[in-house]
Amino acid sequence: MHIISTLQIAIRAMRANKVRTGLTVLGMVIGIASVIIVFSAGEGINSLILGEVESFGGADIIETEIKVPSSKKGSGAEVQSGVNLVSGVQVTTLTLDDMEDINKLPNIKQSYAGIMGQEQASYGNELRKTLLFGTTANFIDIDQSEIDYGRFFTDAEDRSLSQVVVLGYKIKEKLFGGSDPIGKSIKIRKTKFRVIGVLKERGAIMTFDFDDFAYVPIRTLQKRVMGIDHVLFMMHQVADTDLMDETIEQMQILLRENHDIAPPEGPIDWLGSPQDDFRVVSMSQSMEVMDTVTGAITLLLLAIVAISLVVGGVGILNIMYVVVTERTAEIGLRKAVGARYRDIMLQFLIEAVLVTIAGGIIGIIFGAGISFLISWGANSYGLDWQFSIPAKAFVVALGFSAFFGIAFGVYPARRAARMEPVEALRNE
């Protein structure tokens, strides 16, 4: 039988049982839509996270941050360090002296250090809780923050413990409303700080709303407010990105010498030695890690989605089995007039594949629509969520559709094709 004729017979059979066909298609629609949503969400989350990591600096940035030393190795040490820091363990060995030593390395262009605290800030009758970001003068040259009006503080003001402050967009609005704050003073823990600048609106990045920060000289915050002499992290800009790995190694050696940490035995990866009380990582490495994490999450979700596809496939198997039973007389009659084994086999396989392909196409449209709504909702919430569906999502979706159509349609098709004409007509 010609393939076109077989296809026409399959389509007529599907039209004759619209409700049953529709219910069978629905199972595949849900599964395939889930595949599209998972791929699109994976792309959205990945672009969101990478965008936020990049907002701290480009490919020429190296970050140094505190880490709790561990007896474990590899990722186990990282997990243990994270748990200890969340539990309140403090690491006070990273200092501004370390930053100044690192700045002497040949490939380091400039750096800034940072600490954070939370205090009440007041002006007149307005009292607001704000996050304090203590940093050095080079912050404004390395970070992507921009001055709206006024200016940022200088290195001389930092070293002289000047009581000056640069306000984020939101905290300025909360304390001063529409009035100009430049030259006016706010109180932070009973200490007056003169406002010298306001930053442009930036938004939230990784749960931190930088528009709600008050930026003060790091030494002023250390000595006059928090009573400490350590920092939480440092950002370094390199002159030559081709020497990034070599520069990171030089920084690790220098910091181990400064902190009296024994050199590690044998080769180590980018995580450093478990005994280190610091971590040195480039922005490129951070983005690679984030990309790996989001990729793993996407695969995990796809594994879960595969269950719904299997359920849909079992539905196809059941429906096609019922179809074969109901159309026994038709099968017997067709075989009696000359239909061969492969003709009957092909007919029912085409029906199964058409059902799954139809479910796949509708599922793709449905999944793309839901993905767009997710992207729209995330952007309405203030997240930079890009609506994107990778080409591989369509390949996987249609591939799964065809695979399940064939895999779960073979048995009913073979059962139909193996019927003897006389027995099929007698059963009717």
Image (tube, rainbow, N blue to C red):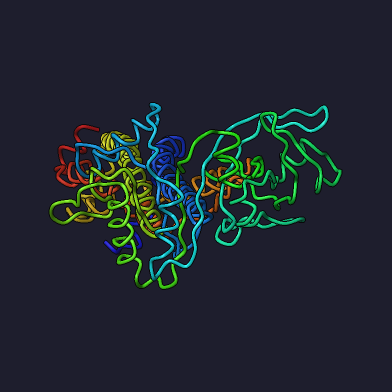
Residue at 78% of width from left, 40% of height from top?
Answer: 185
**Looking at the image, which is closer to me, 88 or 47?**
88
Residue 32 drawn at (x, y percent):
40, 45
Q: Image check: 57 left or right of 351?
A: right
Residue at 26% of width from left, 61% of height from top?
Answer: 1
Residue 406 drawn at (x, y percent):
26, 49
Q: Give the residue at the far front of this rendering.
A: 160
Q: Across the whole image, how many numbered discs are drawn on residues?
A: 0
**Looking at the image, which is closer to me, 19 or 416?**
19
The quadrant where residue 16 appears: top left
The quadrant where residue 181 appears: top right
Residue at 69% of width from left, 50% of height from top?
Answer: 201
Can the viewer see residue 428? yes
Q: Image check: 421 left or right of 37?
A: left
The answer to whether residue 119 is above or below residue 17 is: above
Q: Image check: 207 left or right of 154?
A: left
The answer to whether residue 232 is above or below residue 109 is: above
The quadrant where residue 213 appears: top right
Residue 139 drawn at (x, y percent):
57, 56
Can the viewer see residue 319? no
**Looking at the image, which is closer to me, 220 or 88?**
220
**Looking at the image, which is closer to me, 215 or 312?**
215
Residue 234 drawn at (x, y percent):
46, 51
Q: Quadrant of the C terminus?
A: top left
